[in-house]
């Protein structure tokens, strides 16, 4: 894809994420996606997202910056939401959190083949768990 196509692709992916539409999100992710330091495969990723959406029903990402080159795309996002359900063993706190997120994707045939980026540490810290 051309860089402008990658930007449009990411905008569509982010829209599916912000709608919490797990089936639409699945269409953007390769079945055997590799995730740095996390279980691989699309089902593991969707399970993690479902857990996030359950814990933060109003979770949304706002795109800050996207850089695309060849089959790679780097994104800087702000994620935010209110903690209303259990998250990673942390009871609901009703706290509103706002975190910086960074990710690097390798996209093959319109699907994410590899991803690496921020972890949940900043989010967990804002919940007062560390």
Image (spheres, rainbow, N blue to C red):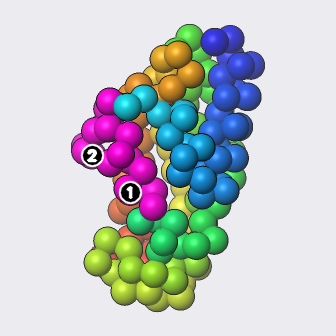
Q: Position of residue 100 (x, y in %)?
A: 54, 55
Image marks 2 and 1: residues in contact by CB distance under 8 Å? yes
Residue nearest the viewer, comparing 130 with 10:
10
Q: Residue at x 47, y 74 (%)?
A: 55
Badge 2 or badge 1: first in the primary sequence: 2
For image coordinates 29% across by 78% down, the residue present is 89
- Relative to residue 102, is residue 31 depicted above or below? above
Asked which quadrant contains residue 20, the reply is: bottom right
In the visual, does 11 lie left or right of 99? Answer: right
Label 2 Cα neighbours within 10 Å, binned few <14 / some 14-19 / many ≥20: few
What is the secondary structure assignment of the residue under circle 2?
Answer: loop
- Asked if residue 87 shows in the view, the reply is yes
Q: Is residue 104 magenta?
A: no
The secondary structure type at the circle numbered 1 is: helix
Q: Is residue 46 magenta?
A: yes
In this figure, which residue is indicated by the disc labeled 1?
48
The reply to whether residue 61 is visible in this rendering is no
Residue depicted at x 45% and y 56%: 49
- Mark 2 or 1: in front is 1
| Res 67 → quadrant | top right
Side (left or right) of 94 relative to 88: right
Mark sitting on residue 38: 2
Which residue is drawn at the image coordinates 58% and 73% (left, top)? 57
* The residue stretch that appears in magenta: 32-50
Badge 1 local density, few (<14 within 10 Å), some, or many (20+)? some
Would residue 89 be found to the left or right of residue 110 on screen? left
Quarter of image, res 126: bottom left
Where does the image place residue 103, in percent across and percent down from the top left?
48, 39
Q: How far from the left and from the top, in percent, is residue 86? A: 39, 80
């Amino acid at each position: 894809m051309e860089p402008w196509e990658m930007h449009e692709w990411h905008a569509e992916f982010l829209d599916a994420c912000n709608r919490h539409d797990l089936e639409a999100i699945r269409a953007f992710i390769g079945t055997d996606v590799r995730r740095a330091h996390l279980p691989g495969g699309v089902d593991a990723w969707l399970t993690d997202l479902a857990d996030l959406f359950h814990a933060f029903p109003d979770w949304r990402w706002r795109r800050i910056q996207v850089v695309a080159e060849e089959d790679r795309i780097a994104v800087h996002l702000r994620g935010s939401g209110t903690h209303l359900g259990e998250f990673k063993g942390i009871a609901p706190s009703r706290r509103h959190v706002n975190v910086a997120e960074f990710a690097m994707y390798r996209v093959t045939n319109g699907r994410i083949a590899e991803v690496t980026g921020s972890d949940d540490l900043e989010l967990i810290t804002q919940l007062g768990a560390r």
